[in-house]
Image (tube, rainbow, N blue to C red):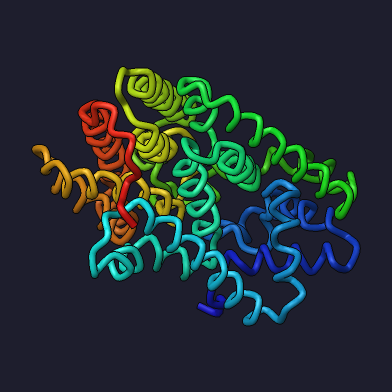
Amino acid sequence: MGKPFGTDFLAFWSAARLALAGVPEAAWDLARIGAMERASVVVDPGLSSFLYPPPFLLVCLPFGMLPYCGGLAAWLALTGGLYLAAIRRWLVPHHGVLMTVTAFPAVIVNIGHGQNGFLTGALLASGLGLAGRRPWLAGMLLGTMIVKPQLALALPIFVIAGGHWRVMGGALASMGLWCLASMVVLGQESWVAFFHAAPVGQAILDQGLVDPAKMVSLYAAMRVLHSPGWLAFVVQLTGATGAALMLVFVTRAPGVSREAAGALTAAVTLLMSPFLLDYDLTLAAIPIAWLFSQGVRRGFRPWDKLVLAACFALPLVGRSIAMATGVPVAPVILWALAIQVARAALRTHGDAGRPNCG
C-alpha cells in the first residue's frame, strides 16, 4: 500500500537522479544504510538497495533525465520492445507469436516491478542467437550482461565448451568498454562505493531481507523449507555444478547445434545463481520458445508439453504456491525444463538452422 507502480524502477530512477546530480556513490551508500536498518527493507529492495554495478547505473542515466512516470514508461517500452523482438526470433512463425510472448506471465511480473528482466532477456536471447553467425556482435551483447553479472554465470561455460573464441573476444571488449565508460562518466568513486556495498547482497540472502518464497533458486527453496543458510548454499552449489556439467556435456556432444547449446545455456542460467527472483524468469522464454519450436518441427517428446505448460505458468503461480503452502516448486520446474532442452538438443543431429524461419 502506498507504493508506486514499478517499485523497483524507483531504485534505478533515483540512483540515476543522484548520479546526474553529481553524487553517484550515494546510491550504494543508501544500500549500506538500508542493510543496517533492515527493518525498512524487508519486503522489496526499493530505494535503499541499489546493488547493481556501475555499468547498470550508466544504462539508467537517460531515464533519470525524465520525470518518474515518463522514465518508467520509456524504460518498459524500450527494453520491452527489444525483448519481444529478441524472443520472437527463437519461435517458429505463426499468427500467435507476438501474443504468445506478451502473454508469458514473467512479462507481466516484470512490468509490475519495473525491473530489468526485459533488458537481460533481450541481451541473452540476442547474444546466444547470434553466436554462430555474428560472433563479435554476439560477444558485445553478452558482455553487456555485466549490468547483472549473476545472470551471466553460464556464459563462460557456453563460450569455452563450444570454442566460441570470437564471442569471448567481443564479450571481453564489451565488458572493458562498459567498465571504462562508467569510470569516465560516474568516476572511480562509483566502483569503490559498489564494492563497499557488496556485503549487502550476502546479508539479503543470509537474513532473509527478501522473502525466499519470492525467489526461484535452489538456495531459496531450501530456505523456504527452513534449511540453515550453509546447507542451502551447499545445495545451490551442488545443483549449479551439476547444471554446468550438463551444459558442457551437451555443448561438446557431436552434432549439437549452436542454437540448441544456446537454449540450454539460457535454461542453465536459471539454475546457477542463488539470488533469482520471479521477474528474472523472462529468461525462461528462450528455452521455452526453442523447445516449443523443436516440438513443432520434429514432434514433441514425452513430458515436453507438460514441462512447457508448467514453465509458462511458473511466474504466475510459483510465488503464491511457495508462500501459501511452503512448497517451493520453481527449482523442480526449472530443472525439468533444462533436462528436456538437453534431451532435445542431443537429437538435433547437427541441424544448423536457426530456431525459426522468421
State the image coordinates of residue 281 (x, y, percent, origin top left).
40, 52
69 or 129: nearer the viewer: 129
191 or 321: nearer the viewer: 191
Q: Does residue 180 appear anywhere in the picture?
A: yes
Measured along the vertical axis of the image, is residue 180 above or below residue 26? above
Q: Does residue 238 appear anywhere in the picture?
A: no
Q: Quadrant of residue 226?
A: top left
State the image coordinates of residue 51 (x, y, percent, origin top left).
67, 49
Residue drawn 84% across the image and 57% down it: 24
Residue drawn 36% across the image and 42% down it: 224
Residue drawn 67% across the image and 49% down it: 52
Left or right: 154 in relation to 37: left
Q: Quadrant of residue 246?
A: top left
Left or right: 212 in relation to 179: left
Left or right: 5 in relation to 33: left
State the image coordinates of residue 108 (x, y, percent, origin top left).
39, 68
